[in-house]
Image: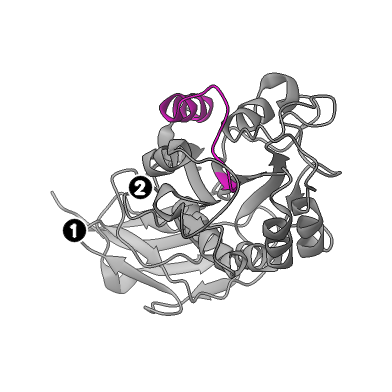
Amino acid sequence: MKLLSKVLCFAAAFGALSGCGSDSPDLIGKAIFKNEEFQEKPKDFTVFNPKVDILFVIDDSGSMADAQNNLSRNAFAFADAISKVSILDYHIGVVTTDMDECRSRCGKLVGSPVYVEKTTPDLVANLARRMLVGTNGSPTEEMFGPVVEALSPSLELGANLGFYRQDAFLAVIFITDAKDQSQLAPQDFLKVLATKKGDAARVLGYGVIRTLAEEKSCDGSEDLDNKLEVFLESVVNGDKAQKNILSLCSPDYGVKLAEFAKDIVKRTAGTVKLSRTPDVKTIKVSYGTQVIPNSLTEGWVYEPSTNSILLSEGIVWNVQGPGVGLTIDFEAIDME
């Protein structure tokens, strides 16, 4: 016997075709996409678009002038990769590593308004200006402390109002040539963020840094330790291969930031796990008025091993109105 099943997914993005882990969403009457819940209505659907808050932590000490210029010149690569995904709702903010001058810094987001989003006019230029944070900051660089302070209740509801959203993923990107000199250990820092989000799987970490392994080849005046590397290996997107780390000494690291953007998109809105086994011939995928084809390179494919729909990096998303989500229709196979 076949039953007609209609599921709604708010997760859409261009993401690399990859398998779906155990934390993938179950799309049923009450569906969960990585802890973002919505209710199906009998004749209607409530649509939720995937969200991510991206926080750059940029070293503003005296040794960072060249690195900041490189970053600012290539801000377009990151912004372009993120902005191509019209369904992804993102906030991007910048803080510095200076925790000495709390009147103007100490976790306060740079710029006004305090973050950029996909509706920000002249997005790339706006983001690039924020990344040029200067080099007059404290030589006692803190990477973990400014993040904790930026997300503290006093700033979340004060100077940084609007940036942080409880239902969004959090991605932190460190850019520094130094070690972290805050009082937090890496595991304690991750615990703080995981507690804030309610789930460590919703915390992503990336770094453009000098690693201990390249301390001699990537010369600098700053002392190093492994605190940043330990943290970046412990987040859900980290591993021993350090794919979430770029070398600050690489002349093209700014361009490579686009790879971080693509990874953020893939992890926050790239794979849809179905609650029932579909008759593959009946699957129809659409985004508003746009029909998404069954294509390995420009659309979607069905992965039987995980009962998932995988979305190709090559999808060109048409701009839709607000509140539009991805819908997946299919006839379910009765497994009883």
Closer to us: mark 1 or mark 2?
Answer: 2
Q: Which residues are magenta?
A: 172-197
- Is 178 in the magenta? yes
- The disc, 1 or 2, on the residue closer to the chain's N-terminal end is 1
Disc marking residue 286: none
Q: Amino acid at mark 1?
A: Met
Q: Nearer the viewer, residue 42 or 164?
A: 164
Residue 243, by quadrant, is bottom left
Q: Amino acid at mark 2?
A: Ser
Q: Nearer the viewer, residue 98 or 173?
A: 98
Circle 1 is placed at which residue position? 1
At 62% across and 46% down in the image, what residue appears?
Answer: 54
In the image, residue 163 sits, relative to residue 103, either above or below, namely below
**Does 72 sit left or right of 35 as displayed?**
right
Q: Position of residue 17 (x, y in %)?
A: 36, 67
- Identify the image's colour scheme: rainbow, by chain, secondary structure or one colour: one colour
Asked if the residue under mark 2 is in contact with the one under mark 1, i.e. CB atoms within 8 Å, the reply is no
Q: Which residue is more in the foreground, 92 or 43?
A: 92
**Residue at point 67%, 44% (across, down):** 59
Viewer-proximal residue among 327 and 170: 170
Image location of residue 137, percent across then percent down: 76, 38
Residue positioned most to the left: 336
Q: Residue at x 42, y 39 (%)?
A: 226
Horizontal side of 34 relative to 153 (left or right) equals left
In the rendered image, residue 143, in percent from the top left (x then y), is placed at 59, 36
Taking the spot 80% from the left edge, 48% from the top edge, the residue there is: 134
Res 24 label: 2
Residue 35 versus residue 10 in the image, above or below: above
Tell me if residue 145 can be seen.
yes
